Image: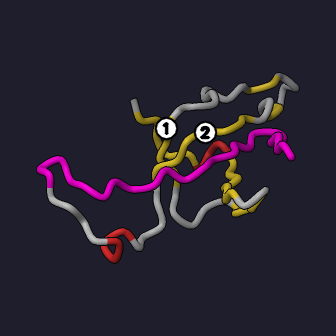
Amino acid sequence: MQIQPLSDRVLLKGVEPENVTKGGILLPQSANKERPNVYEVVAVGPGKLDKDGKTVTIDLKPGDKVLSGQYSGDEVEVDGVKYKIVAFEYVLAKIS
């Protein structure tokens, strides 16, 4: 099954947090219980119409890493994989 977001929606997949810090310290599983705020873009909708009827495109593409609000959007599960669908305005930043 494939999901294609509509309008200005973005389909995101959570990126698992690292278990080792940059300094080489191994973190226990209990330290990573927070929901991830870092996501990978899986699919992007075609964009939203502005008041003049022109399509405002979304400046993201599949594979981009982004930050999104922790409680924004809706979570869905397809074929055992958890995704999050959010409006483009709830994507806070792009990570390069």
Badge 1, how many Cα within 10 Å: few under 14, some, many 20+? many
**Residue at point 67% right, 55% down?**
83
Q: Position of residue 61 (x, y in %)?
A: 63, 27
Residue 15 is covered by the magenta coloring: yes
Residue flagged by tag 2: what amino acid is it? Val
Find the magenta span and give its range. Answer: 1-24
Q: Position of residue 77 (x, y in %)?
A: 74, 62
Q: Which mark is residue 41?
A: 2
**Residue at point 46% right, 50% down?**
38
Q: Can you say which quadrant of the picture contains the C terminus? A: top left
Mark pair 1, 2: CA separation: 6 Å
Question: In this view of the protein, which residue sits in the foreground, 41 or 93?
Answer: 41
> Dots 1 and 2: beta carbons under 8 Å?
yes
**Residue at point 54% right, 53% down?**
14
* Left/right of residue 53 with respect to residue 14 in the rendered view: right
Q: Position of residue 26 (x, y in %)?
A: 20, 61
* Left/right of residue 52 with respect to residue 62 in the rendered view: right
Badge 2, how many Cα within 10 Å: few under 14, some, many 20+? many
Question: In this view of the protein, which residue sits in the foreground, 65 or 57?
Answer: 65
Name which quarter of the figure residue 50 lies in. top right
Q: Which mark is residue 65?
A: 1
Q: Is residue 67 above or below residue 63?
A: below
Visible in this render: residue 50?
no
Q: Position of residue 34 (x, y in %)?
A: 42, 70
Furthest-top residue in this view? 54
Q: For the residue labelled by badge 1, is the local secondary structure a helix, a strand or a loop?
A: strand
**Residue at point 46% right, 60% down?**
36
Residue flagged by tag 1: what amino acid is it? Lys
